[in-house]
Amino acid sequence: MKLYSTKNRKHVVSLKEAVMKGLPPDNGLYMPERIPSLPKTFIKNLSKYSFQEIAFEVSKTLLQGCIPQKDLKKIIEKSVTFPAPVVPLDESKSVLELFHGPSLAFKDFGARFMAQLMSYFNKGEKQELVILVATSGDTGGAVASGFYKTPGVKVVILYPSGKVSFLQEKQLTTLGENISAIEVKGTFDDCQAMVKQAFLDKELNSNIRLSSANSINIARLIPQMFYYFEAFKQLSPKGRDVVFCVPSGNFGNLTAGLIAKRMGLPISHFIAATNANDVVPEYIKKGKFSPRSSVRTISNAMDVGNPSNFARMMDLHGSTWNHLKKEISGLAFDDKETRQGVKEVFDNFNYTIDPHGAVGYLALKEFQETNPNTLGVVLETAHPSKFLDDMENILQSKIEIPKRLASLIDKPKEAALMNRKFNTFKEWLLENY
Protein backbone atom coordinates (compact mmCIF):
# COMPACT_ATOMS: atom_id res chain seq x y z
CA MET A 1 0.00 0.00 0.00
CA LYS A 2 1.30 3.40 -1.02
CA LEU A 3 -0.21 6.77 -0.12
CA TYR A 4 0.02 10.21 -1.73
CA SER A 5 -0.59 13.76 -0.51
CA THR A 6 -3.85 15.40 -1.54
CA LYS A 7 -1.73 18.45 -2.45
CA ASN A 8 0.83 16.56 -4.52
CA ARG A 9 0.13 13.14 -6.03
CA LYS A 10 3.83 12.74 -6.79
CA HIS A 11 4.62 12.74 -3.06
CA VAL A 12 4.19 9.01 -2.33
CA VAL A 13 5.06 7.25 0.95
CA SER A 14 4.64 3.87 2.67
CA LEU A 15 1.86 3.15 5.16
CA LYS A 16 4.41 3.29 7.99
CA GLU A 17 5.56 6.77 7.06
CA ALA A 18 1.99 8.03 6.56
CA VAL A 19 0.89 6.66 9.94
CA MET A 20 3.93 7.71 11.95
CA LYS A 21 4.22 11.20 10.47
CA GLY A 22 0.49 11.90 10.25
CA LEU A 23 0.75 14.79 7.78
CA PRO A 24 2.72 15.27 4.54
CA PRO A 25 5.28 18.12 4.58
CA ASP A 26 3.07 20.12 2.19
CA ASN A 27 0.18 20.16 4.75
CA GLY A 28 -2.00 17.94 2.58
CA LEU A 29 -3.55 14.68 3.75
CA TYR A 30 -2.47 11.15 2.91
CA MET A 31 -4.77 9.08 0.69
CA PRO A 32 -4.38 5.50 -0.62
CA GLU A 33 -2.88 5.42 -4.11
CA ARG A 34 -5.33 2.64 -4.90
CA ILE A 35 -8.60 1.63 -3.23
CA PRO A 36 -9.08 -2.06 -4.09
CA SER A 37 -12.48 -3.74 -4.36
CA LEU A 38 -13.51 -6.55 -2.03
CA PRO A 39 -14.78 -9.78 -3.62
CA LYS A 40 -18.50 -9.64 -4.36
CA THR A 41 -18.88 -12.99 -2.61
CA PHE A 42 -17.57 -11.39 0.61
CA ILE A 43 -20.14 -8.59 0.41
CA LYS A 44 -22.91 -11.08 -0.36
CA ASN A 45 -21.97 -13.30 2.59
CA LEU A 46 -21.31 -10.62 5.23
CA SER A 47 -23.76 -12.30 7.61
CA LYS A 48 -21.41 -15.29 7.86
CA TYR A 49 -18.53 -13.23 9.25
CA SER A 50 -17.91 -12.00 12.79
CA PHE A 51 -17.10 -8.32 13.35
CA GLN A 52 -13.39 -9.17 13.79
CA GLU A 53 -13.39 -11.28 10.62
CA ILE A 54 -14.96 -8.41 8.68
CA ALA A 55 -12.35 -6.00 10.04
CA PHE A 56 -9.55 -8.36 9.05
CA GLU A 57 -10.82 -8.90 5.50
CA VAL A 58 -11.40 -5.18 4.89
CA SER A 59 -8.01 -4.11 6.28
CA LYS A 60 -6.15 -6.97 4.58
CA THR A 61 -7.62 -5.96 1.22
CA LEU A 62 -6.91 -2.26 1.67
CA LEU A 63 -3.38 -2.62 3.07
CA GLN A 64 -2.34 -4.97 0.26
CA GLY A 65 0.24 -7.00 2.15
CA CYS A 66 2.22 -4.21 3.82
CA ILE A 67 1.61 -5.89 7.19
CA PRO A 68 1.94 -9.70 7.52
CA GLN A 69 -1.47 -11.31 7.99
CA LYS A 70 -0.60 -12.85 11.37
CA ASP A 71 0.44 -9.43 12.71
CA LEU A 72 -2.63 -7.76 11.22
CA LYS A 73 -4.86 -10.35 12.92
CA LYS A 74 -3.25 -9.54 16.28
CA ILE A 75 -3.86 -5.82 15.70
CA ILE A 76 -7.53 -6.52 14.94
CA GLU A 77 -7.94 -8.89 17.88
CA LYS A 78 -6.60 -6.27 20.31
CA SER A 79 -8.52 -3.31 18.88
CA VAL A 80 -11.94 -4.59 17.78
CA THR A 81 -13.13 -5.85 21.15
CA PHE A 82 -16.64 -4.41 21.48
CA PRO A 83 -19.82 -4.57 19.35
CA ALA A 84 -21.51 -2.09 17.00
CA PRO A 85 -25.20 -3.08 17.17
CA VAL A 86 -27.91 -1.73 14.89
CA VAL A 87 -31.07 -0.80 16.82
CA PRO A 88 -34.25 -0.31 14.74
CA LEU A 89 -36.44 2.70 15.52
CA ASP A 90 -39.11 1.82 12.95
CA GLU A 91 -39.26 0.08 9.57
CA SER A 92 -37.23 2.75 7.78
CA LYS A 93 -34.90 4.15 10.46
CA SER A 94 -32.23 2.47 12.57
CA VAL A 95 -29.46 3.61 14.89
CA LEU A 96 -25.92 2.22 14.70
CA GLU A 97 -24.60 2.34 18.27
CA LEU A 98 -20.91 3.15 18.24
CA PHE A 99 -20.49 3.95 21.94
CA HIS A 100 -19.78 0.52 23.42
CA GLY A 101 -16.01 1.03 23.67
CA PRO A 102 -14.01 2.18 26.71
CA SER A 103 -14.51 5.93 26.22
CA LEU A 104 -18.17 5.58 25.13
CA ALA A 105 -17.61 7.15 21.70
CA PHE A 106 -17.19 5.95 18.10
CA LYS A 107 -13.64 7.20 18.11
CA ASP A 108 -12.63 4.22 20.25
CA PHE A 109 -12.55 2.17 17.03
CA GLY A 110 -10.04 4.48 15.39
CA ALA A 111 -7.97 5.21 18.48
CA ARG A 112 -7.50 1.58 19.56
CA PHE A 113 -6.61 0.41 16.04
CA MET A 114 -4.22 3.31 15.64
CA ALA A 115 -2.57 2.58 19.00
CA GLN A 116 -1.94 -1.03 17.99
CA LEU A 117 -0.71 -0.04 14.51
CA MET A 118 1.65 2.61 15.86
CA SER A 119 2.98 0.21 18.51
CA TYR A 120 3.68 -2.27 15.70
CA PHE A 121 5.53 0.31 13.60
CA ASN A 122 7.30 1.78 16.65
CA LYS A 123 9.11 -1.43 17.61
CA GLY A 124 12.87 -0.94 17.74
CA GLU A 125 12.71 2.87 17.87
CA LYS A 126 14.89 4.38 20.60
CA GLN A 127 13.40 7.89 20.62
CA GLU A 128 9.91 8.17 22.14
CA LEU A 129 6.97 9.08 19.89
CA VAL A 130 4.93 12.14 20.88
CA ILE A 131 1.37 12.08 19.57
CA LEU A 132 -0.47 15.38 19.25
CA VAL A 133 -4.25 15.42 19.10
CA ALA A 134 -6.81 18.23 19.02
CA THR A 135 -10.26 17.40 20.31
CA SER A 136 -13.68 19.02 20.22
CA GLY A 137 -14.94 16.45 22.71
CA ASP A 138 -14.70 12.74 22.02
CA THR A 139 -11.43 12.24 20.15
CA GLY A 140 -9.30 13.11 23.15
CA GLY A 141 -10.95 10.61 25.48
CA ALA A 142 -10.71 7.82 22.93
CA VAL A 143 -7.05 8.53 22.16
CA ALA A 144 -6.19 8.81 25.85
CA SER A 145 -7.81 5.44 26.51
CA GLY A 146 -6.33 3.79 23.40
CA PHE A 147 -2.73 4.88 24.08
CA TYR A 148 -2.78 4.76 27.89
CA LYS A 149 0.50 3.24 29.18
CA THR A 150 1.63 2.33 25.62
CA PRO A 151 5.44 1.88 25.85
CA GLY A 152 7.53 4.45 23.99
CA VAL A 153 4.54 6.72 23.29
CA LYS A 154 3.49 10.01 24.91
CA VAL A 155 0.18 11.73 24.10
CA VAL A 156 -0.59 15.46 24.22
CA ILE A 157 -4.27 16.40 23.96
CA LEU A 158 -5.33 19.98 23.14
CA TYR A 159 -8.93 20.92 23.91
CA PRO A 160 -10.86 24.24 23.87
CA SER A 161 -11.46 25.66 27.34
CA GLY A 162 -15.11 25.60 28.39
CA LYS A 163 -16.23 23.95 25.17
CA VAL A 164 -16.27 20.26 26.12
CA SER A 165 -18.68 18.68 28.58
CA PHE A 166 -17.71 18.07 32.22
CA LEU A 167 -17.39 14.30 31.76
CA GLN A 168 -15.57 14.64 28.42
CA GLU A 169 -13.02 16.88 30.16
CA LYS A 170 -12.58 14.32 32.94
CA GLN A 171 -11.72 11.68 30.33
CA LEU A 172 -8.96 13.92 28.96
CA THR A 173 -7.46 15.19 32.18
CA THR A 174 -7.50 12.43 34.81
CA LEU A 175 -5.42 9.55 33.42
CA GLY A 176 -1.89 10.86 33.94
CA GLU A 177 0.98 8.45 33.13
CA ASN A 178 1.86 9.07 29.44
CA ILE A 179 -1.21 11.29 28.79
CA SER A 180 -0.96 15.11 29.07
CA ALA A 181 -3.77 17.61 28.50
CA ILE A 182 -3.58 21.25 27.38
CA GLU A 183 -6.60 23.49 27.93
CA VAL A 184 -6.49 26.09 25.14
CA LYS A 185 -8.16 29.47 25.55
CA GLY A 186 -9.79 29.29 22.12
CA THR A 187 -11.85 27.07 19.83
CA PHE A 188 -11.32 23.58 18.47
CA ASP A 189 -10.15 25.14 15.21
CA ASP A 190 -7.42 26.95 17.16
CA CYS A 191 -6.35 23.63 18.72
CA GLN A 192 -6.32 21.94 15.32
CA ALA A 193 -4.29 24.78 13.77
CA MET A 194 -1.70 24.51 16.56
CA VAL A 195 -1.32 20.78 15.96
CA LYS A 196 -0.98 21.22 12.20
CA GLN A 197 1.58 23.99 12.62
CA ALA A 198 3.63 21.77 14.92
CA PHE A 199 4.03 19.20 12.15
CA LEU A 200 5.32 21.86 9.79
CA ASP A 201 7.81 23.36 12.27
CA LYS A 202 11.35 22.24 11.39
CA GLU A 203 12.84 22.89 14.85
CA LEU A 204 10.18 20.83 16.60
CA ASN A 205 10.50 17.96 14.17
CA SER A 206 14.26 17.88 14.42
CA ASN A 207 14.04 17.49 18.21
CA ILE A 208 10.85 15.47 18.74
CA ARG A 209 9.31 12.50 16.89
CA LEU A 210 5.81 13.82 16.28
CA SER A 211 2.68 12.11 15.01
CA SER A 212 -1.05 12.81 15.04
CA ALA A 213 -4.06 10.88 16.29
CA ASN A 214 -6.70 13.14 14.73
CA SER A 215 -8.62 11.98 11.70
CA ILE A 216 -5.97 13.75 9.63
CA ASN A 217 -4.05 10.49 10.23
CA ILE A 218 -5.05 7.77 7.78
CA ALA A 219 -4.77 5.17 10.58
CA ARG A 220 -7.95 6.63 12.09
CA LEU A 221 -9.98 6.21 8.92
CA ILE A 222 -9.13 2.57 8.22
CA PRO A 223 -10.96 1.10 11.26
CA GLN A 224 -13.86 3.51 10.88
CA MET A 225 -14.74 1.63 7.70
CA PHE A 226 -15.24 -1.60 9.64
CA TYR A 227 -18.52 -0.66 11.27
CA TYR A 228 -20.18 0.36 7.99
CA PHE A 229 -19.74 -3.25 6.86
CA GLU A 230 -20.81 -4.54 10.28
CA ALA A 231 -23.95 -2.37 10.16
CA PHE A 232 -24.83 -3.46 6.63
CA LYS A 233 -24.53 -7.07 7.78
CA GLN A 234 -27.26 -6.50 10.34
CA LEU A 235 -29.74 -4.87 7.94
CA SER A 236 -32.51 -6.37 5.83
CA PRO A 237 -32.86 -3.90 2.94
CA LYS A 238 -35.56 -5.94 1.11
CA GLY A 239 -35.01 -4.05 -2.14
CA ARG A 240 -34.62 -0.63 -0.53
CA ASP A 241 -31.61 1.64 -0.96
CA VAL A 242 -29.43 1.86 2.15
CA VAL A 243 -28.57 5.38 3.32
CA PHE A 244 -26.11 6.27 6.08
CA CYS A 245 -26.63 9.52 7.96
CA VAL A 246 -23.42 10.70 9.60
CA PRO A 247 -23.30 13.41 12.30
CA SER A 248 -20.21 15.30 11.14
CA GLY A 249 -17.55 17.63 12.50
CA ASN A 250 -14.15 16.98 10.96
CA PHE A 251 -15.74 14.54 8.46
CA GLY A 252 -13.38 11.62 9.05
CA ASN A 253 -16.32 9.33 9.80
CA LEU A 254 -18.08 10.16 6.55
CA THR A 255 -14.84 9.90 4.57
CA ALA A 256 -14.36 6.38 5.94
CA GLY A 257 -17.85 5.51 4.71
CA LEU A 258 -17.01 6.83 1.25
CA ILE A 259 -13.92 4.59 1.13
CA ALA A 260 -16.00 1.61 2.32
CA LYS A 261 -18.33 2.27 -0.61
CA ARG A 262 -15.38 2.45 -3.03
CA MET A 263 -14.35 -0.99 -1.75
CA GLY A 264 -17.70 -2.42 -2.76
CA LEU A 265 -20.18 -1.89 0.07
CA PRO A 266 -23.49 -1.08 -1.69
CA ILE A 267 -24.35 2.18 0.10
CA SER A 268 -26.79 4.21 -1.97
CA HIS A 269 -26.26 7.64 -0.43
CA PHE A 270 -24.70 9.56 2.47
CA ILE A 271 -26.21 12.38 4.50
CA ALA A 272 -23.79 14.80 6.15
CA ALA A 273 -25.62 16.07 9.23
CA THR A 274 -24.17 19.08 11.06
CA ASN A 275 -25.16 21.60 13.69
CA ALA A 276 -24.86 25.38 13.20
CA ASN A 277 -21.31 24.77 11.91
CA ASP A 278 -22.68 24.07 8.45
CA VAL A 279 -19.68 24.73 6.19
CA VAL A 280 -20.00 21.45 4.27
CA PRO A 281 -23.83 21.42 3.87
CA GLU A 282 -23.49 24.97 2.59
CA TYR A 283 -20.86 23.82 0.09
CA ILE A 284 -23.03 20.93 -1.10
CA LYS A 285 -25.91 23.34 -1.74
CA LYS A 286 -23.98 26.27 -3.24
CA GLY A 287 -20.65 24.90 -4.47
CA LYS A 288 -18.61 27.36 -2.41
CA PHE A 289 -16.39 26.24 0.49
CA SER A 290 -16.21 29.02 3.09
CA PRO A 291 -14.47 27.89 6.30
CA ARG A 292 -15.02 30.12 9.31
CA SER A 293 -14.63 30.20 13.07
CA SER A 294 -16.69 27.52 14.78
CA VAL A 295 -19.60 28.38 17.06
CA ARG A 296 -20.44 26.55 20.26
CA THR A 297 -23.42 24.15 20.30
CA ILE A 298 -24.79 21.36 22.50
CA SER A 299 -23.44 18.85 19.95
CA ASN A 300 -19.93 20.05 20.68
CA ALA A 301 -17.95 17.28 18.95
CA MET A 302 -19.24 18.73 15.67
CA ASP A 303 -18.18 22.30 16.44
CA VAL A 304 -15.70 22.51 13.57
CA GLY A 305 -15.52 25.49 11.23
CA ASN A 306 -12.79 24.21 8.90
CA PRO A 307 -13.07 20.41 8.62
CA SER A 308 -9.78 18.78 7.69
CA ASN A 309 -11.23 15.81 5.85
CA PHE A 310 -13.01 18.00 3.34
CA ALA A 311 -9.78 17.71 1.30
CA ARG A 312 -10.12 13.92 1.26
CA MET A 313 -13.80 14.11 0.31
CA MET A 314 -12.96 16.34 -2.63
CA ASP A 315 -10.06 14.09 -3.62
CA LEU A 316 -12.41 11.08 -3.76
CA HIS A 317 -14.74 13.04 -6.01
CA GLY A 318 -12.14 14.37 -8.42
CA SER A 319 -12.28 17.78 -6.74
CA THR A 320 -15.60 18.58 -8.39
CA TRP A 321 -18.76 19.85 -6.72
CA ASN A 322 -21.07 18.03 -9.18
CA HIS A 323 -19.67 14.60 -8.32
CA LEU A 324 -19.72 15.17 -4.56
CA LYS A 325 -23.30 16.44 -4.33
CA LYS A 326 -24.61 13.36 -6.18
CA GLU A 327 -23.30 11.08 -3.44
CA ILE A 328 -23.76 13.27 -0.36
CA SER A 329 -26.64 15.41 0.88
CA GLY A 330 -25.96 18.03 3.54
CA LEU A 331 -28.38 19.18 6.24
CA ALA A 332 -27.86 21.34 9.33
CA PHE A 333 -29.87 21.95 12.50
CA ASP A 334 -29.58 24.44 15.35
CA ASP A 335 -29.67 23.72 19.09
CA LYS A 336 -33.41 24.31 19.43
CA GLU A 337 -34.10 21.74 16.71
CA THR A 338 -31.53 19.36 18.25
CA ARG A 339 -33.31 19.48 21.61
CA GLN A 340 -36.61 18.78 19.87
CA GLY A 341 -34.97 15.85 18.09
CA VAL A 342 -33.74 14.29 21.34
CA LYS A 343 -37.24 14.59 22.83
CA GLU A 344 -38.97 13.29 19.68
CA VAL A 345 -36.83 10.16 19.52
CA PHE A 346 -37.49 9.46 23.20
CA ASP A 347 -41.24 10.12 22.98
CA ASN A 348 -41.82 8.27 19.70
CA PHE A 349 -39.40 5.35 19.99
CA ASN A 350 -38.54 5.13 23.72
CA TYR A 351 -34.89 5.53 22.72
CA THR A 352 -32.40 7.91 24.36
CA ILE A 353 -30.27 9.52 21.68
CA ASP A 354 -27.44 11.98 22.33
CA PRO A 355 -27.41 15.48 20.74
CA HIS A 356 -25.12 14.39 17.88
CA GLY A 357 -27.33 11.43 17.06
CA ALA A 358 -30.37 13.69 17.28
CA VAL A 359 -28.90 15.92 14.55
CA GLY A 360 -28.45 12.75 12.46
CA TYR A 361 -32.02 11.64 13.16
CA LEU A 362 -33.43 15.01 12.06
CA ALA A 363 -31.38 14.91 8.86
CA LEU A 364 -32.48 11.37 8.02
CA LYS A 365 -36.12 12.24 8.75
CA GLU A 366 -35.97 15.23 6.39
CA PHE A 367 -34.16 13.23 3.70
CA GLN A 368 -36.74 10.44 3.82
CA GLU A 369 -39.60 12.87 3.28
CA THR A 370 -38.51 13.01 -0.38
CA ASN A 371 -36.86 9.57 -0.45
CA PRO A 372 -39.43 7.38 1.34
CA ASN A 373 -38.30 3.99 -0.03
CA THR A 374 -34.93 4.09 1.70
CA LEU A 375 -33.56 2.24 4.70
CA GLY A 376 -31.70 4.79 6.80
CA VAL A 377 -29.04 4.28 9.45
CA VAL A 378 -28.06 7.07 11.85
CA LEU A 379 -24.59 6.79 13.36
CA GLU A 380 -25.01 7.30 17.12
CA THR A 381 -21.53 8.46 17.91
CA ALA A 382 -21.50 8.86 21.71
CA HIS A 383 -23.29 7.68 24.82
CA PRO A 384 -25.94 10.19 26.03
CA SER A 385 -24.41 10.34 29.53
CA LYS A 386 -21.39 12.20 28.15
CA PHE A 387 -23.72 15.21 27.76
CA LEU A 388 -25.43 14.76 31.11
CA ASP A 389 -26.63 18.28 31.90
CA ASP A 390 -28.10 18.93 28.46
CA MET A 391 -29.71 15.48 28.22
CA GLU A 392 -31.33 15.64 31.66
CA ASN A 393 -32.49 19.19 30.99
CA ILE A 394 -34.11 18.16 27.69
CA LEU A 395 -35.76 14.97 28.91
CA GLN A 396 -36.42 16.09 32.49
CA SER A 397 -35.27 12.70 33.73
CA LYS A 398 -32.11 11.06 35.04
CA ILE A 399 -29.59 9.58 32.59
CA GLU A 400 -27.75 6.50 33.77
CA ILE A 401 -23.97 6.95 33.75
CA PRO A 402 -21.95 3.80 32.96
CA LYS A 403 -19.54 2.88 35.76
CA ARG A 404 -16.40 3.50 33.69
CA LEU A 405 -17.49 7.12 33.21
CA ALA A 406 -18.98 7.69 36.69
CA SER A 407 -15.68 6.63 38.26
CA LEU A 408 -14.00 9.76 36.82
CA ILE A 409 -16.32 12.33 38.40
CA ASP A 410 -14.32 12.87 41.61
CA LYS A 411 -10.84 12.50 40.09
CA PRO A 412 -8.77 15.72 40.03
CA LYS A 413 -8.30 17.49 36.71
CA GLU A 414 -4.73 17.95 35.50
CA ALA A 415 -4.27 20.25 32.50
CA ALA A 416 -1.94 23.06 31.42
CA LEU A 417 -3.86 26.25 30.63
CA MET A 418 -2.49 27.89 27.49
CA ASN A 419 -3.22 30.71 25.07
CA ARG A 420 -3.79 29.90 21.41
CA LYS A 421 -0.42 31.20 20.18
CA PHE A 422 1.63 28.52 18.46
CA ASN A 423 4.93 29.74 19.93
CA THR A 424 3.59 29.17 23.45
CA PHE A 425 2.70 25.60 22.52
CA LYS A 426 6.05 25.09 20.78
CA GLU A 427 7.97 26.25 23.85
CA TRP A 428 5.92 23.92 26.07
CA LEU A 429 6.70 20.94 23.81
CA LEU A 430 10.43 21.68 23.71
CA GLU A 431 10.54 22.06 27.51
CA ASN A 432 8.63 18.85 28.18
CA TYR A 433 9.94 16.51 25.45
Image: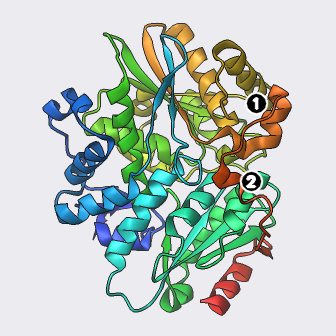
Dot label at residue 235:
none
* Residue 284 picture quarter: top right
| Image position, residue 203 (x, y; %) | 55, 89
* Residue 78 picture quarter: bottom left
- Mark 2: few/some/many CA within 10 Å (<14, 14-19, 20+): some
Left or right: 8 as drawn, with respect to 329: left
Q: Amino acid at mark 1?
A: Asp
**Relative vertical location of residue 84 with respect to residue 180 in this rendering, above or below:** above
Residue for point 36% across, 12% down? 240
Left or right: 317 as drawn, with respect to 402: left
Residue 317 appears in the figure: no
| Image position, residue 338 (x, y; %) | 74, 28
Front in this rendered view, residue 65 or 112: 112
Q: Are marks 2 and 1 in contact (CB under 8 Å)?
A: no
* First in residue order: circle 2 vs circle 1: 2
- Residue at disc 1, secondary structure: loop
Residue for point 64% across, 22% down? 362
- Residue at disc 2, secondary structure: helix
Q: In the picture, which quadrant includes the N terminus?
A: bottom left
Disc 1: which residue = 334
| Render colour scheme | rainbow
Residue for point 48% across, 7% down? 372
Disc 2: which residue = 167
Front in this rendered view, residue 429 or 153: 153
Front in this rendered view, residue 107 or 369: 107
Residue for point 82% across, 29% down? 397
